[in-house]
Amino acid sequence: MKPFLSSKHFLLAAAAAVWCLAAQAQEAPPGADVESLLALAKLNNPEYGAMRYEAAAASERIGPAAALPDPVLRTELRNVTNYGAGGDFSLLPSQVGSTKYTLMQALPFWGKRDLKREAAEAEAAAATGRAEGSWTEQAARIKATFAQYFAVTRLIGLAREVIDLINRIEGITQARYAGGLAPQQDAIRAQVERTAMLSELIRMETEYLNTRSSINALLARPAHAPLASPERLRPVPPPARLDYAALEQRARDKNPQIFAADARIRAAEKTRDLAYRNRYPDFTLGVSPIQTGSRVNEWELMLELNIPLQQESRRSQEREADQMINAARSRKDATANQLLAELSSNLAALDAARRVEMLTQTSLLPQAELTFRAALAGYESGKVDFATLLEAQRQIRSANQDIIKARAEQQVRLAEVERLIGEDL
């Protein structure tokens, strides 16, 4: 009997299956976790892309900044009328009195080219810092928006669970009303509560669509492009890793805005040094062969230099450069102060959200669940009225909502902290 599949056919089938699985994996929409969104945004986000191109353009200015000016070639035709030589007017070098060719090269004073290159390098570093700052901003927005996406998805699930619970309660009220153990008002109130929850569900589904559109905009995808259901949030570091003093130093060392401010200070300092170096003259060297007839029989050498007589103008430029350094330093101080104030505020908000979640999870929610179970049992036995049962149900819903919102708030604050220190925790 022949085998059902030959080894060749088996290998082909296995390869096809692997290819199909790979294609499905590639087609799977992002959104299950924030890492997939960040990886896609780093490739596609247009604002970050524009800043990277600007940084690349700034780096291309380094070479030209230190380059010598282009040389100059000058041609002088002497005695083109051939006066005294008995000839006619001509523009041909061999048929005029003489032709002088001058090749000139401008040479800046010693050290000026190095200062220009160093200033351009500092400006390129500042552009790189701005690009990295743009990415930290975009990454923080993606992390915060994903936290909202996660929260609204969980809130929608919670709302549907509450609607199912209300349907169950309504069934109990209908049974009690049919048995003459409860007034019709209880059944009506259950229906009103369900309608209110359905309205809230519609509002949250609208918020879900808006959040999805915001994420897709950050990823440069169509607004209605599908996203995977969020599966998990990033773990929040323990309080020991959120010490303000340590994070303050990391912010000073790693924050792209502070890095860019330092680079602008260096650029201003190099520009100031160049302004002082302009007190010294620049040179131009030249060599000139002189053609008479068809032969070159003379050579000339030339040295030219500018005379820096306009000292008042140069002093003004030097004072301007000094003030630009002061401005760059003040701007860095202002940036650092603002960033550190935001860092302190976000750490406090993160700690508050953590404590709210812990308190609600360990205390409020268990108490609300016990209250609801007791109220439900009491209502079924006729010992508790329907209003008490509804209030107990609302307490459970409110506690669960507070937990979801507190977790999302922690993620938002964590994203802000990471933006401020310039790296992930």
Image (cartoon, rainbow, N blue to C red):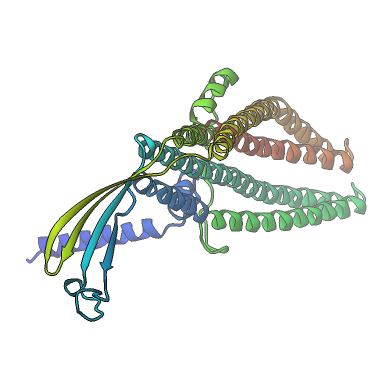
Relative vertical location of residue 11 with respect to residue 180 in this rendering, above or below? below
| In the foreground, 123 or 307 | 307
Report which quarter residue 108 is drawn in. Answer: top left
Residue 117, relative to residue 359: is it above or below?
A: below
Q: Residue at x 79, y 54 (%)?
A: 194
Q: Which percent across, then down, holds residue 396?
A: 74, 37
Residue lying furthest front: 84
Q: Position of residue 379 (x, y in %)?
A: 84, 39
Residue in view at x 48 percent, y 54 percent: 50
Quarter-of-image position of residue 115: top left
Visible residue check, residue 324: yes
Horizontal arrangement in the rendering, residue 276 relative to residue 390 (left or right) = left
Camera-side residue of 159 and 339: 339
In the picture as drawn, the residue positioned furthest to the bottom comes out as 88
Q: Is residue 24 left or right of residue 197?
A: left
Q: Looking at the image, is 335 positioned above or below residue 127?
A: above
Q: Position of residue 127 (x, y in %)?
A: 47, 44
Asked if residue 87 is positioned above or below residue 306 in the image, the reply reads below
Residue drawn at 82 percent across, 41 percent down: 380
Taking the view exactly as shown, the residue that stands out farthest to the left is 1
Residue 417: percent from left, percent from top: 58, 32
Q: Quadrant of the N terminus?
A: bottom left
Residue beneath the point at 66% across and 39% down: 404
Work out whether residue 78 or residue 27 is closer to the camera in this orientation and state it: 78
